[in-house]
Image: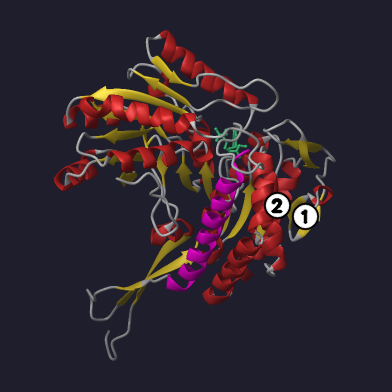
């Protein structure tokens, strides 16, 4: 797709915004304009919702196998076009090409998983409690749905909502992040080419997120909204959903702890810590934000992390060998700076990095802080950057207590060789996703989602499709011959 081809995708057509406004998507590596595209307003979003309403009944009536086959075709197309899609993603989001390729494969895996799950939606026939009656439970698509998605995974955050929605028989209107709308539109092209009927999917990018989201939240015909983003915006959507009693899935902020015990395989722990922390420059909601390392191994772990992060190549993600790209925008760099400065002012030791780079682009160097305390900003707020804050602990109870001392509950990681301890931590860590000796637990067949202020609802796995299905129950009476 050339830059001039970007347009809103509404009701199966590529078009301009009704108000004629446009906006630019910038490359965070150098500030260049990647593309200009129409800036949707509320009236465009209303068109998309109306189109979804029109398309809903027919889509829900299609055989499940046909809906699934559509998703499988698009998964194949994504893999076939992985290189172009990955380059586009790197240009609009900043993550290095290798990361972007990985995300395209990850995104396609959700379409594949849910393409197969379409055929595996089951109801129930309940035990007889009255001989004259039979009791049935049906699963039906919830109807018209909407997704509001963030910029950090421009493709995967869409497919893990869109995959189950389409598989279940729902239509979906997507408002992608205004920072990364191009990947969303490129995927819409693939659905169009695969023959998706008009209106089943619309992609409506625009700069005024509250106004666009306001349209879907206020419309009673939109029966469900799935959101990934900040806890603050999730809270706004939850309040707005009350007016029409809409179903919600909220995947909100996180503040993942990573606990490394002195009986851990230290090489494995370091490898996994680097992968978990540096994927997408630390701009992920499952990125470890607090590293608790048991006292006797803390110096070794700290040195190894500094060595590994210090050797990573920082630069434009399109260049060969670059492992750390720019952060998504200027404000992201300012936030990381604020967190690191606060820690250093409070007495933390700067072991590595600790500054932005000179020259263009929103780059911040991989950073390691030691002696971090729980009251520092890095320990309380999501940093969303390449910062490893190290803190020492003495025993398991202390580690668990400190790890749980946050409003968030998305992901937690721990490294130990003690099987009994693994099970104790599985019970006691208040998180929806646990990585036990694993820094990358996410995959399409597993339920992804948080506890506490990290939201509710699950994406992926056989749980993911339930978010798009309503449970209906029918009691059929009068079936005994000759019964009164
Ligand atoms: P992040 O910190 O990941 O950027 P945001 O919550 O700000 O998280 O953004 C996630 C998505 O929510 C984006 O698509 C953004 O445009 C959208 N968004 C931002 N503010 C609002 C709002 N007030 N109402 C609805 N959607 C919003």
State the residue position of label 1.
1
Q: Position of residue 99 (x, y in %)?
A: 55, 46
Q: Which mark is residue 199?
A: none
Q: Quadrant of residue 305?
A: top left
- On the image, the x and y values in percent for residue 53 come to 65, 59
Instruction: Determine whether the residue tagged by mark 1 lies in a helix, strand or loop.
Output: loop
Please, is residue 398 above or below residue 473 in the view?
above
Q: Residues within 10 Å of mark 2 (few under 14, many from 20)?
A: many
* Residue 98 painted magenta: yes
- Image quadrant containing the N terminus: bottom right
Residue 391 visible in the current orientation: yes
Q: Quick one: which residue is furthest to the bottom in this view? A: 482
Seen from the viewer's position, the closer of residues 180 and 465 is: 180
Mark 2 close to ligand 1, CB under 8 Å: no
Q: How many marks?
A: 2
Q: Is residue 180 visible?
A: no
Seen in the picture, residue 312 relative to 471 is either above or below; the reply is above
Which corner quadrant holds the C terminus?
A: bottom left
Dots 2 and 1: beta carbons under 8 Å? yes
Q: Which residue is mark 2?
A: 185
Task: Please give the range of residues in magenta.
Answer: 94-120
Q: Look at the image and name its color scheme.
A: secondary structure
Graded by Cα atoms within 10 Å as few (under 14), some (14 to 19) or many (20 or more), the crowding at tag 1 reads few
């Amino acid at each position: 797709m050339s830059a001039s081809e970007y347009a809103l995708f509404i009701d199966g057509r590529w078009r301009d915004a009704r108000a004629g406004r446009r906006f630019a998507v910038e490359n965070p590596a150098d500030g260049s304009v990647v593309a200009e595209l129409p800036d949707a307003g509320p009236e465009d979003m209303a068109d998309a919702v109306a189109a979804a309403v029109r398309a809903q009944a027919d889509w829900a009536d299609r055989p499940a196998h046909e809906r699934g086959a559509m998703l499988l075709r698009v998964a194949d197309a994504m893999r076939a076009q992985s290189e172009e899609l990955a380059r586009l993603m790197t240009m609009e989001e900043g993550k290095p090409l290798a990361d972007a390729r990985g995300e395209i494969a990850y995104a396609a895996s959700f379409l594949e998983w849910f393409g197969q799950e379409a055929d595996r939606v089951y109801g129930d026939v309940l035990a007889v409690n009255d001989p004259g009656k039979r009791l049935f439970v049906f699963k039906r698509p919830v109807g018209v749905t909407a997704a509001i998605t963030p910029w950090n995974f421009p493709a995967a955050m869409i497919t893990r909502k869109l995959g189950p929605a389409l598989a279940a028989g729902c239509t979906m209107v997507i408002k992608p992040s205004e920072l990364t709308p191009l990947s969303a539109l490129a995927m819409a092209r693939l659905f169009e080419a695969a023959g998706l009927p008009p209106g089943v999917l619309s992609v409506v990018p625009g700069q005024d997120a509250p106004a666009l989201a306001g349209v879907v939240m206020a419309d009673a015909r939109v029966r469900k909204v799935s959101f990934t983003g900040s806890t603050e915006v999730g809270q706004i959507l939850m309040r707005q959903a009350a007016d029409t009693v809409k179903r919600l899935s909220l995947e909100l902020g996180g503040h993942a702890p990573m606990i490394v015990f002195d009986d851990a395989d230290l090489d494995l722990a370091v490898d996994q810590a680097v992968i978990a922390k540096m994927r997408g420059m630390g701009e992920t909601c499952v990125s470890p934000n607090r590293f608790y390392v048991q006292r006797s191994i803390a110096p070794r772990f700290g040195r190894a992390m500094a060595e590994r992060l210090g050797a990573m190549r920082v630069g434009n993600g399109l260049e060969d060998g670059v492992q750390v790209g720019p952060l998504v925008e200027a404000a992201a760099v300012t936030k990381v700076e604020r967190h690191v400065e606060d820690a250093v002012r409070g007495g933390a030791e700067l072991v590595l990095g600790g500054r932005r780079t000179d020259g263009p682009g929103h780059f911040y160097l991989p950073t390691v802080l030691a002696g971090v305390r729980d009251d520092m900003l890095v320990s309380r707020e999501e940093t969303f950057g390449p910062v490893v804050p190290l803190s020492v602990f003495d025993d398991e109870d202390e580690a668990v207590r400190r790890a749980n001392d946050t409003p968030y509950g998305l992901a937690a990681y721990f490294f130990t060789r003690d099987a009994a301890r693994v099970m104790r931590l599985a019970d006691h860590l208040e998180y929806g996703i646990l990585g036990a000796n694993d820094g990358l637990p996410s995959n399409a067949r597993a339920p992804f989602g948080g506890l506490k202020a990290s939201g509710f609802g699950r994406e992926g796995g056989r749980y993911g499709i339930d978010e798009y299905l309503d449970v209906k129950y029918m009691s059929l009476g009068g079936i005994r011959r000759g019964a009164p």
